[in-house]
Amino acid sequence: MFVINFKNYDEISGVRTQKLAAISQKIAKKYKIKIAICPPHHLLGVKYSGPIISQHVDNAKIGSTTGFVIPELLKKSKIAGSLINHSEHRIPPKDIADLVERLRNLKMTSIVCVQDVVEASKYAKLNPDYIAIEPPELIGSGKAVSTERPELITEAAKAVKSAKNSTKLLCGAGIVSGADVRKAMELGSSGILVASGIVKAKKWSAIVEEFAKAMLKTPSNR
């Protein structure tokens, strides 16, 4: 799984969201890998043949809940799933548990973001589709967790595996090169969650392709 979080960066505002979506779609098809995109909420209707993932979802009910992002309505809008508990939008543990279950019942993809191994172990037991490990101090830093704290990926992979379910590990924070991607996957990650490393790059096509090729070259994907 290769997830691109667009966040709310100015670089993808307006029609540029569609441009990055088109590039991602082309490269996903070329290399036969799954690339999911996470546009800002007001741009979730972007044209894209792959999985579109919401950046956030709320544990709120259908109906009179103004301003909330509701799982069931995302499903009806053909959104594939959601990030949950991103470091920039943390939510209470109960809401995390409830949302993982709601998305599972809707057959939607859940990606629970965690800051450390303790959280990885805790939330892997909920059996989300993915646990994404992202130390907050490295997010947007240009310093990859696979380089700065490789043991974190290894330990998180063990924690996820110990849950003995179908949850897989994604690696995020500071990924800026194909070498970062390869290292993360060699350490036990099943994919990547990346934002500024792509969105703020000068040549989107080149960097998305570099990351995609790096995923194919790792031992776990041979």
Image (cartoon, rainbow, N blue to C red):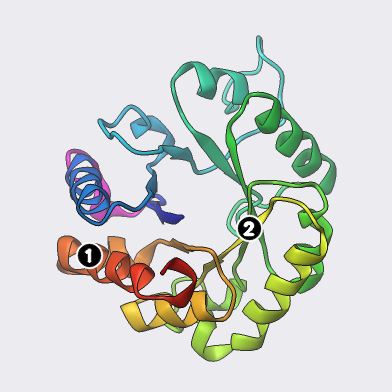
Residue placed furthest toward the bottom: 148
Residue range corresponding to the magenta coloring: 9-17
Residue 143 location (% of width, % of height): 45, 84
**Residue 66: within the magenta?**
no
Q: Is residue 19 above or below residue 49?
A: below
Residue 87 showing in the rendered view:
yes
Q: Earlier in the sequence, mark 1 or mark 2?
A: 2
Which residue is labeled 2 in the image?
Answer: 168
In the image, residue 49 lies at what x, y percent?
A: 29, 34
Taking 125 as reference, is 94 above or below it?
A: above
Question: As rendered, which of 48 and 34 lies closer to the eye?
Answer: 34
Name the image quarter holding residue 189. Answer: bottom right
**Is disc 1 placed on a helix, strand or loop?**
helix
Q: Answer left or right for 94 relative to 52.
A: right
Tag 2's secondary structure? strand
Position in image of residue 115 (x %, y %): 68, 68
Answer with left or right where residue 147 lies relative to residue 218: right
- Residue at screen point 80% across, 57% down: 164
Badges 1 and 2: C-beta atoms under 8 Å apart?
no
* Residue at mark 1: 209
